[in-house]
Image: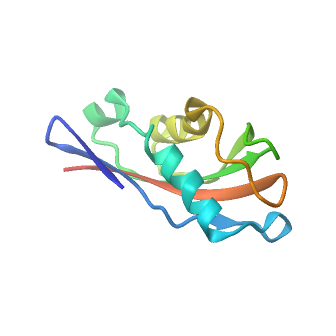
């Protein structure tokens, strides 16, 4: 999913998500979570002004009811601004789709690229 801001910024969320083995969930649920989070993804103004780009991998822990319990950084982008934004992003969504198999965790790659 791609969003354009002012015609020169692209925020891409890769909809391919990876569930950890202990919390294995159907691919359709993982993709629904990735889409929900991507819909709220924005490019931080400070990162745009500094020319920061990169992909952040964030692990999102989701309760059985779909509440975001916590997030952790799996792989940084090289930009602390983008990393902080990616860690905060899942909580901006509010409630995510409830995992069909109970509490789950999913790793999401979030890409920020200037055009």
- The answer to whether residue 69 of the structure is visible from this angle is yes
Which quadrant is the N terminus positioned in? bottom left
Q: Is residue 22 left or right of residue 85?
A: right
Q: Nearer the viewer, residue 99 or 61?
A: 99
Q: Name the residue rendered at 45%, 37% in the picture.
A: 40
User: Splitting the image into 4 quarters, where does residue 32 fall?
Assistant: bottom right
**Quarter location, residue 68:** top right
Residue at 54 percent of width and 36 percent of height: 89
The relative height of residue 6 versus residue 29 in the rendered view (above or below) is above
Horizontal placement of 90 versus 5: left or right?
A: right
Q: How many marks?
A: 0
Q: Nearer the viewer, residue 13 or 78?
A: 13
Nearest to the observer: residue 47 or residue 14: 14
- Name the image colouring: rainbow
Q: Is residue 92 above or below residue 110?
A: above
Residue 53 spot, x, y in % from top left:
35, 49
Q: Position of residue 64 (x, y in %)?
A: 82, 47
- Residue at 74% over, 66% down: 25
**Residue sitting at 45 percent across and 61 percent down?**
14
**Quadrant of res 111:** bottom left
Q: Position of residue 57 (x, y in %)?
A: 57, 55
Question: Given the current orientation, which residue lies at the most extreme left position?
Answer: 7
Question: Is residue 57 visible in the rendered structure shown here?
Answer: no
- Figure check: 101 above or below 81: below
Question: Would you say 95 lies left or right of 89 here?
Answer: right
């Amino acid at each position: 999913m791609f969003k354009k801001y002012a015609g020169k910024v692209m925020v891409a969320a890769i909809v391919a998500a990876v569930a950890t083995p202990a919390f294995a969930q159907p691919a359709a649920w993982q993709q629904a979570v990735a889409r929900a989070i991507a819909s709220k993804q924005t490019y931080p103004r400070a990162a745009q002004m500094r020319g920061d780009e990169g992909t952040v991998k964030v692990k999102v822990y989701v309760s059985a009811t779909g509440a975001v319990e916590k997030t952790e950084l799996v792989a940084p982008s090289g930009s602390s601004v983008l990393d902080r934004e990616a860690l905060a992003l899942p909580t901006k969504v509010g409630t995510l789709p409830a995992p069909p198999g109970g509490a789950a965790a999913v790793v999401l790659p979030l890409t920020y690229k200037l055009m």
